[in-house]
Image (tube, rainbow, N blue to C red):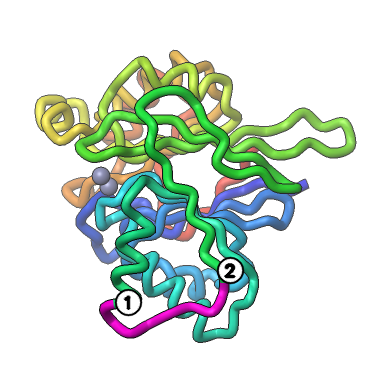
Amino acid sequence: MNFYTTILGSGAALPTGHRRCSAQVVNINGFKLLLDCAEGTQDRIRQHHLKLQSLGTVLISHLHGDHFFGLAPLLSTMHLCGRTEPMTIAAPKGAKEVIETTFALTGNHVDYEMNFIEMDFAEGIHRVFEGKRCTVDAFPILHSVPTYGFRITEVPRGGHPARVYAYCCDTAFSETIVPYIQGADLLCLECTFANELADLARERQHLTAGQAGTLARQACVRQLLLTHISARYHEPDQLLAQAAAEFPAAQVATDGQIVEIK
Ligand SMILES: [Zn+2]
Ligand SMILES: [Zn+2]
């Protein structure tokens, strides 16, 4: 049974030639979830031959542009390509208004049903999607605007234990996150800054590499995938070393990479 994520963008807010902004397509035994949707995501979906119309659900962590500005054009293209299947979109409160206002003011529309699940809670873990292949639970993380992490759990078949993929992007360091990501088979965490820029990380509510490794260790996850890498780091060796000092099973994501949840 397949459970893997294709990284479409592993960079922070400023896209570069080799790291675009946040987006991933998670495949759970054939069912596809889009996880964040930065500008240009639809182009990268095509580039990686992931078939736009095969996306069943979109999960948006927060409404900062580097996670959300690609959604309106992606939904519009799906309409232009003849989509009739409904689309479920779990996103922070306000996303529905942004998309509907954008379409209304620009004279665009879609013929398929957009089913928005607007997240608006400050604590606890809440189920936002339940399908045949997976369930998705959302939980608040710590950032400058309301932001949510996701815990994607496969529906087990044939006696296999359910694998879990947890995603947190963007967040400041907080041990309140640990119970929500506990025991994940793969944890994808933002890692915007190196340890030397801890003050800047605190100010902008992001993680350093060492903090990302610490959260992975505290949550007893199996593997750690670092993403949302600041454009100032051309080579991520320093970030990897600092995270691995806390949690050895760490890797830095690259655009186009496929990472299996195992
Ligand atoms: Zn971001
Ligand atoms: Zn952000």
Instruction: Give the foreground label among 2 and 1.
Output: 1
For the question of whether residue 182 can be seen, the reply is: yes
Answer whether residue 109 is magenta in the image.
yes
- Could you tell me which secondary element the residue under label 2 belongs to? loop
User: Who's the residue at 13% across and 30% down the image?
Assistant: 197
Tell me the number on the disc at residue 50: 2
- Relative to 43, does residue 216 appear above or below in the rendering? above
Give the mark, 2 or 1, whose residue is nearer the N terminus: 2
Query: Where's residue 233, x and y in %?
Result: 21, 46
Q: Give the side of residue 207 with respect to residue 80, left or right.
A: left
Tell me the kind of residue under disc 1: Ala
Magenta residue span = 105-112
Q: Quadrant of residue 162?
A: top right
Q: CA distance from mark 2 to mark 1?
A: 29 Å
Q: Depth check: 77 or 97 in front?
A: 97
For the question of whether residue 19 can be seen, the reply is: no
Query: What secondary structure is the magenta-colored segment mainly?
Result: loop
Q: Quadrant of the C terminus?
A: top right
Q: Depth check: 191 or 254 in front?
A: 191
Tell me the number on the disc at residue 34: none
Q: Quadrant of residue 211?
A: top left
Query: Where's residue 96, x and y in %?
Result: 38, 58
Tell me the kind of residue under disc 2: Leu
Give the residue at mark 1: 104
